[in-house]
Structure formats: structure tokens, C-alpha cells
């Protein structure tokens, strides 16, 4: 039970730490020969609850290097769907004055990763792609002065988790908590190893939170 608890704390701590420093997708480009399709947010970083646009750039490269032509009237025969988790919604696409550029107004209501699906054909070329776009961020990314209440609560929770793990280690060393296995020494070592990983992950998460402030 203790090992499971330790591993659970470790996974939570690492996930929390990785979530803080994970890079965003920004604009993503896919190739559907002979076309190049780029999708992303009009305003970056995208923030939950704030009106934005999903934007597209669809081009066809020319014979000379670094030359291209914007593809027009793409969404006459292509359907666009925005997806988040298990939810999806068909979106209307507007043409930008620049040839090959398009946009669709949207207010993202949840933080996390969004994806755009395009299905149809461009001038006879079949298109069926899913394009991930930059993660939507919480409003805290734009807060100024920054609100410390959320960060402090996170740090307190992580410190409490470390305290709990320290108590578990003490109980394990004193013999109050028994570890049963065919090889007692191996089970003991594994339990201590699991608790160490969990503690290290939580400490990293606390350091990341402090640096973020």
C-alpha cells in the first residue's frame, strides 16, 4: 500500500512539474501534397475565456525556392471541426483579405490542448488531417500583479504531501509499517526507492512553482 501511495505521489508531482514547463505547440504545419496547411491561434498565448481566432494559412509552393501562392476558396469543399477531449464542434471559416489565409472566431472555455480536423478536398486533392494547436492557458498567465493565492495553495499542498511521505519513511524504518514479499530486503528497498522518487518529484514541482513567481 505504501509503495502504491509513493508512486502515486511521484506521478502527481512529476505531472505537475512537467505541466508547468511543457512547451506549447504554437502554429503547426502539415503537408498534403502539393499543399502546405498551417493552423494555430491568432493571438498567442491563447487564454481561457478570452475571444480569439483559429487561423489557417494554406499555400502551394512554386517552382522557385521560397516562392508560394496562397490557395483561395479552400473551405468551399473542406469542413473544419475543432476538438477538445471528447467534444467537437463544426466551425465556420472566414476568408482573410490575404490569399490563402483564413480565420474562425472562438472563445476557448477550457484550458488544455485543442485540435482542428479538416476533411474534404482542395482542388481534387483529398484532405483528412488533424492538427494540434497551442494549449489554451489559464488567465493567470496574464494576471498583473500576479495572484499569489493559487501558487501558495499549490505549494502548501505539495509540502503536506512531502510531510506525509516523511512520516511513511519513518514508519518504514521503525518497523511500524510492515513490508511483505518473498524477498523482504528487496521489498524494503523498493518501498524506500518509491518514496524517494515521490519526494524528489514533489520537490521539483515546488521549485518550479517558486521560480514561476
Image: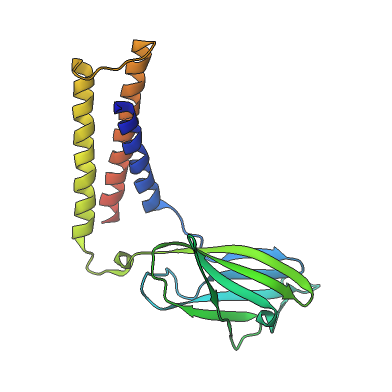
Q: Residue 65: in sight, yes or no?
A: no
> In the rendered view, does 161 fall on the left or right side of 90?
left
Residue 30 found in image quarter: bottom right
The furthest residue to the bottom: 97
* 97 w.r.t. 139: above or below: below
Q: Give the colour scheme of this rendering.
A: rainbow
| Residue 75 in the image: above or below residue 33 | below
Q: Position of residue 183 (x, y in %)?
A: 38, 10
Q: Nearer the viewer, residue 167 or 181?
A: 181
Q: Quadrant of the C terminus?
A: bottom left
Q: Residue 175 at x, y = what percent? A: 20, 15
* The N terminus sits in image quarter: top left
Residue 112, percent from left and from top: 42, 60
Q: Is residue 118 visible?
A: yes
Q: State left or right for residue 91 relative to residue 192.
A: right
Residue at (52%, 66%) from the top-left corner? 83
Where's residue 81, x and y in %?
57, 71
Q: How many numbered circles are shown?
A: 0
Q: Quadrant of residue 43?
A: bottom left
At x 73%, y 70%, the residue is: 35
Q: Is residue 206 left or right of residue 128?
A: left
In this view, which residue lies farthest toward the right? 63
User: Which residue: 40% across, 47% down?
Assistant: 18
Q: Who is closer to the viewer here, 194 or 101?
A: 194
Q: Residue at x 69, y 84 (%)?
A: 73
The foreground one among 156 and 107 is 107
Amino acid at each position: 500500500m505504501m509503495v502504491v501511495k509513493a508512486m502515486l505521489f511521484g506521478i502527481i508531482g512529476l505531472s505537475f512539474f512537467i505541466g508547468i514547463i511543457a512547451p506549447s505547440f504554437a502554429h503547426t504545419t502539415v503537408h498534403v501534397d502539393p499543399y502546405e496547411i498551417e493552423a494555430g491561434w491568432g493571438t498567442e498565448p491563447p487564454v481561457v475565456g478570452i475571444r480569439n481566432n483559429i487561423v489557417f494559412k494554406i499555400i502551394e509552393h512554386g517552382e522557385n525556392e521560397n516562392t508560394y501562392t496562397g490557395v483561395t476558396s479552400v473551405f468551399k469543399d473542406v469542413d473544419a471541426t475543432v476538438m477538445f477531449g471528447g467534444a467537437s464542434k463544426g466551425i465556420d471559416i472566414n476568408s482573410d483579405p490575404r490569399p490563402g489565409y483564413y480565420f474562425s472566431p472562438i472563445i476557448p472555455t477550457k484550458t488544455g490542448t485543442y485540435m482542428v480536423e479538416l476533411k474534404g478536398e482542395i482542388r481534387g486533392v483529398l484532405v483528412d488531417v488533424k492538427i494540434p494547436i497551442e494549449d489554451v492557458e489559464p488567465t493567470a498567465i496574464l494576471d498583473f500583479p500576479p495572484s499569489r493565492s493559487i501558487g501558495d495553495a499549490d505549494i502548501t499542498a505539495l509540502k503536506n504531501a512531502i510531510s506525509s511521505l516523511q512520516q511513511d519513511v519513518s514508519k518504514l524504518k521503525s518497523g511500524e509499517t510492515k513490508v511483505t514479499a518473498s524477498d523482504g530486503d528487496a521489498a524494503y528497498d523498493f518501498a524506500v526507492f518509491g518514496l524517494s522518487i515521490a519526494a524528489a518529484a514533489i520537490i521539483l514541482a515546488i521549485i518550479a512553482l517558486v521560480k514561476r513567481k
